[in-house]
Amino acid sequence: MIIKNVKVFTEDKTFIDGQIAIQDGVFAAGWQETDEVIDGEGCYAIPGLIDIHFHGCKGYDFCDGTKEAIEEIARYEASIGVTAIAPATMTLTVEELERILSVAASYKKENREGADLVGINMEGPFISKVKKGAQDERHIIQCNEEICQRFLDASEGLVKFVGIAPEDNADAVRFIKQMKDKVRISLAHTNADYDTAMAAFDAGASHAVHLYNAMPAFTHRAPGVVGAVSDSGHVMAELICDGVHIHPSVVRATFKMMGEDRMILISDSMRATGMPDGQYTLGGLDVNVVGNRATLVSDGALAGSATNLLDCMRTAVKKMGLPLETAVACATMNPARSLGEYDKYGSIAPGKKGNVVLLDQELNLKAVIKDGKRIS
């Protein structure tokens, strides 16, 4: 396949006029003899997006724990340009989480359509009851190396992130030091103050789940987790740029404070994404969805997002003022690096998976090519 007449997003985070060659499902170095030539008509050509934190879409949730759910999620995500996914779990019983992870591991071995399942982001159960958000506090437990290993074993290596609230776990530093070489430890749904968060990052935690959300506010005398992330150069941080969870000014300020290389755009989308307004569930809790706002029926707390990652990236550019090049990198290159998958995903470079998204000048989706085949 040749995709000609496009503005190609490069690993230097710039767009250049050119063409893209894909052979045997991967990007090739130059022109290839082919019967299939796509005229990009001047579109932006960007790598397939990667969502490392979302729960579901189209009426399905990853924690439904079925291959059908994963496949339907993967198909929808690929159709809107997200060609690799790392869904997030909710706080459920240890046994139920093991079952869900085992199903995902089995699914991974099968040749199914849709976005590639490249990881799992465990948002619970080692979190804070104070900052539980839409998580079910009945199943929140202390972080435990043995239980964490059970999760890693059940997923057969698919779990890439395990979230903890270090202030609620007496042995959090020990846990981080023992597990950090097996899985990335993130701070998630935590009420940690600055010193506690810094101790966790100094011990080897390297990721922050949906920055600003489900954590203490960032203030001038109590910088909390956000301040600790800022002061820890090795830590990558997720941002939900759906226009609901974080004010555009805060998004812009965060990029200035931490730099674009550490930011990862996520959707945090739930099963209502791509569906009509109504009442849905998330982690066993009832959620009302109106437009792209999802709130718990019980107390009105924000409960994930109803926006896909492409729409989040578009919002970051058109409504929040981020440069397109920055937003693209934070939805492709940075998540690939955070997952440890940059050798296969995240940029348009020879030998990587032939996943391309074409966007017109208004950032409307024009085509999705996955593994060298047009799917949308």
Image (cartoon, rainbow, N blue to C red):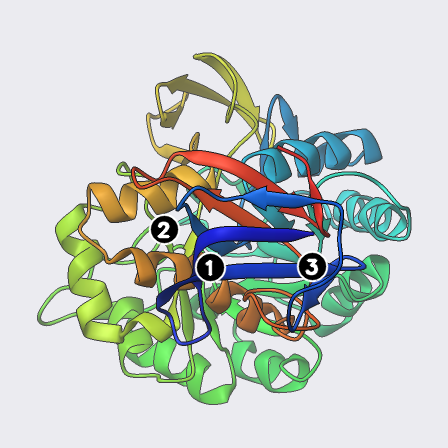
**Residue type at mark 2?**
Ala
Residue 269 at x, y = what percent? 49, 37
Of the numbered discs in the image, which one, if any, rests on residue 188?
1
Q: Nearer the viewer, mark 2 or mark 3?
A: 3
- Answer yes or no: is residue 222 visible: yes
**Total number of numbered discs in the rendering:** 3
- Answer yes or no: is residue 91 visible: no
Q: Nearer the viewer, residue 60 or 16?
A: 16
Q: Nearer the viewer, residue 244 or 366?
A: 366
Q: Which residue is mark 2?
A: 214
Q: Nearer the viewer, mark 1 or mark 3?
A: 3
| Quarter holding residue 36 | top right
**Residue type at mark 1?**
Ala
Q: Image quadrant for the C terminus?
A: top right
Residue 212 at x, y = what percent? 29, 55
- How far apart in space, not on screen, are marks 2 and 3 (Cα)? 42 Å
Q: Are marks 1 and 2 in contact (CB under 8 Å)?
A: yes
Q: Nearer the viewer, residue 23 or 199?
A: 23
Q: Is residue 160 left or right of residue 23?
A: left
Pointer 1: residues within 10 angstroms few (<14), some, or many (20+)? many
Q: Which residue is mark 3?
A: 22
- How far apart in space, not on screen, are marks 1 and 3 (Cα)? 39 Å
Disc 3, SS: strand
**Residue type at mark 3?**
Ile
Residue 243 at x, y = what percent? 26, 38
- Rendered position, 159 above or below 11: above
Disc 1, SS: loop
Q: Nearer the viewer, residue 21 or 297?
A: 21
